[in-house]
Image (tube, rainbow, N blue to C red):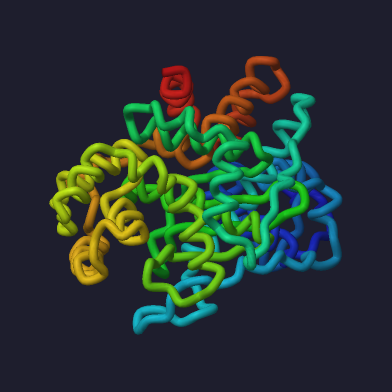
Amino acid sequence: MAELTGIKVNGEVLTWARETSAMRKTKASESSGISLNRLEQLESGNKQPTLQELKTLSKTYRRTIATLLLNSPPPEKPLPRDRRTVNSEIEIGTFSEKTIVAVRKARAIAQSLLELKTDAGISVPKFSESALISDDPSEVASRLRAKWNLSEVRGQEKTNDALEAYIEKVERLGVAVFQLSLTQDNVRGFSIVDDVIPIVGIKGGGEPTTAKIFTLFHEVGHLLLNEGGICDISDKTTIKIEKWCNSFAANLLIPSNELLKQSIVQDYYSQGITAWPKKDLVQLGQVFHVGPLSILRALLENGRTSSNFYRQKHDSWNKSTFGRAKNPEGRNLPKETLREKGRTYVSLAFRAFDQNRIDLKDLSDFLGIKLRYIPKTRQLLNA
């Protein structure tokens, strides 16, 4: 049988559309139903796609057909600036493929989020808060903590519930927040400044929830300064903007006046005790939904412990295995989907499906999971 007439397309554009959608070839083949061999032929330019294949790829990559017919790939937005601490393990400005894919994926999900909101007639609020690096981060934190009414989250008993509540607060400001797989390059989070919808990416699996909360507001600090970045959130950083964002996040989450009012802090101070048992730091951390090191740092800044004690505990606790589950559970794709894309995104996708604005295959594509995982994802969403 003669091959159907192909449409002239630049294979480099097809490659660009796939890569900027954070899809490997195998995933694109699976999602589109186009064989891997055929996809490689189209991207290499050895074969031209049929109209139906072009429509399928347009839907798979969430790009218009007009975009796929461009003569050449449009310029890709650059990665956020490298804000990591210099050490022997990393080379500044160089990232692994996994980190680059995570940033691309965040941008792709944000674009889908905009499409879901636009289609539902939901306006996207503009992130309008700002600060200067010359501003006192503690004063900025105090002002915004009151404005954003973050104190109401303090009542959450479970740290996971507090994280979800904080993410919801940030999303209401017009920021897209995603929890992604950041397993390389010592990256804990990143922020992308954008005129339409700025993005915060948080390291997902294997990260203590308290660390995610701190990272969330560290990256919000970057957005306030209008300076995005890819960060490791190191306490030892000498980078001015990283120190500012660390201080902002710490003061936002642990107000000095509230910390010093805690009975255990007052008792230790009256007895002249500056060496804190870990269990007491964990107990205090539960009040503020932060980790013991964050509490100890706040105590240091308020003269309630010594620099030597803090540094000793920092060096022993701030290791890659600290705070991680000893027996992590196996992969749970519905849970990963909800965590990665967030409740707002997932609920909008289900809403579009329930209102017959997208079909089941579209829903699967928007969620990035196979059809069989959709019922469990909805169940988790409604839990």
Frontmost residue, 47 versus 194: 194
Q: Is residue 249 above or below residue 382?
A: below
Q: Residue drawn at (53%, 30%), measured in percent from left and top?
A: 343
Q: Is residue 96 above or below residue 268?
A: below
| Residue 74 percent coordinates (x, y) | 79, 65
Frontmost residue, 189 versus 181: 189
- Residue 347 appears anywhere in the view: yes
Q: Residue drawn at (22%, 50%), measured in percent from left and top?
A: 269
Using the rendered view, name the quadrant where residue 145 is placed. top right
| Residue 314 percent coordinates (x, y) | 25, 65
- Residue 365 appears anywhere in the view: no
Using the rendered view, name the quadrant where residue 305 is placed. bottom left
Frontmost residue, 377 versus 251: 251
Q: Is residue 173 left or right of residue 216?
A: right
| Residue 178 percent coordinates (x, y) | 53, 45
Q: Is residue 355 above or below residue 303?
A: above
Farthest residue to the top: give it.
Answer: 355
Q: Quadrant of the C terminus?
A: top left
Farthest residue to the front: give it.
Answer: 270
Q: Is residue 56 left or right of residue 342?
A: right
